[in-house]
Image (tube, rainbow, N blue to C red):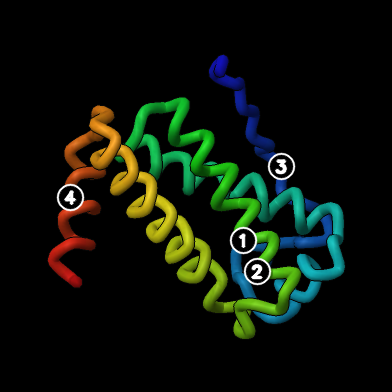
């Protein structure tokens, strides 16, 4: 699979306004209503952060694949009414990201693929917790 080019918007959505980075009930409600500006802000903001986190643990290509999986899982959970508190949204998203990263690291170790040091740390932390 060829690596894709990702462009990030540098503009702040007009409807999200100056409080766009304060993820509260109103922001979550706009996401659930699929407000275009809020969805764009949400995607640009969190995808960039998720990619940075995953690129530290996996190859660039695998990190991009996992970021897509994380964003899809998050959209599905939001549509289902989770999380209930908007101010918990960033922690909720990064919890999903961490869970999928652990799962991916575990699979890569089991399949004998090369994993970064951080990916191995996640794999062994999960094993110790059991």
Q: Earlier in the sequence, mark 1 or mark 3?
A: 3
Q: Secondary structure at mark 2?
A: helix
Q: Residue 9's quadrant in the figure?
A: top right
Asked whether 46 or 108 is in front, the reply is 108
Question: Which residue is label 2 attached to?
Answer: 77
User: Mark 4 near mark 2, Cβ–Cβ under 8 Å?
Assistant: no
Q: Which mark is residue 11?
A: 3
x, y percent for residue 30 = 80, 69
Q: Which mark is residue 74?
A: 1
Identity of the residue drawn at 84% across and 61% down: 34
Q: Earlier in the sequence, mark 1 or mark 4?
A: 1
Q: Secondary structure at mark 1?
A: helix
Identity of the residue drawn at 24% across and 31% down: 112
* Distance from the alpha carbon under mark 2 to that under mark 1: 5 Å
Q: Compared to 122, does 4 lie above or below?
A: above
Residue at the limit of the structure toward the top, as seen here: 2
Q: Is residue 64 left or right of residue 55?
A: right
Q: Residue 113's quadrant in the figure?
A: top left
Q: Residue 53's quadrant in the figure?
A: top left
Q: Compared to 81, does 48 lie above or below?
A: above
| Quadrant where the image shows the N terminus | top right
Q: Which mark is residue 121?
A: 4
Identity of the residue drawn at 75% across and 69% down: 79
């Amino acid at each position: 699979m060829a690596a894709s080019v990702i462009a990030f918007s540098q503009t702040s959505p007009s409807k999200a306004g100056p409080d766009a980075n304060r993820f509260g009930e109103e922001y979550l409600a706009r996401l659930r209503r699929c407000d275009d500006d809020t969805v764009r802000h949400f995607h640009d903001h969190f995808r960039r952060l998720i990619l940075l986190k995953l690129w530290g643990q996996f190859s660039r290509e695998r990190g991009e694949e996992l970021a897509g999986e994380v964003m899809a899982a998050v959209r599905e959970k939001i549509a289902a009414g989770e999380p209930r508190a908007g101010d918990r949204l960033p922690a909720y998203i990064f919890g999903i990201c961490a869970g999928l990263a652990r799962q991916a690291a575990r699979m890569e170790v089991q399949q004998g693929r090369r994993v970064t040091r951080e990916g191995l740390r996640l794999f062994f932390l999960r094993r110790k917790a059991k």
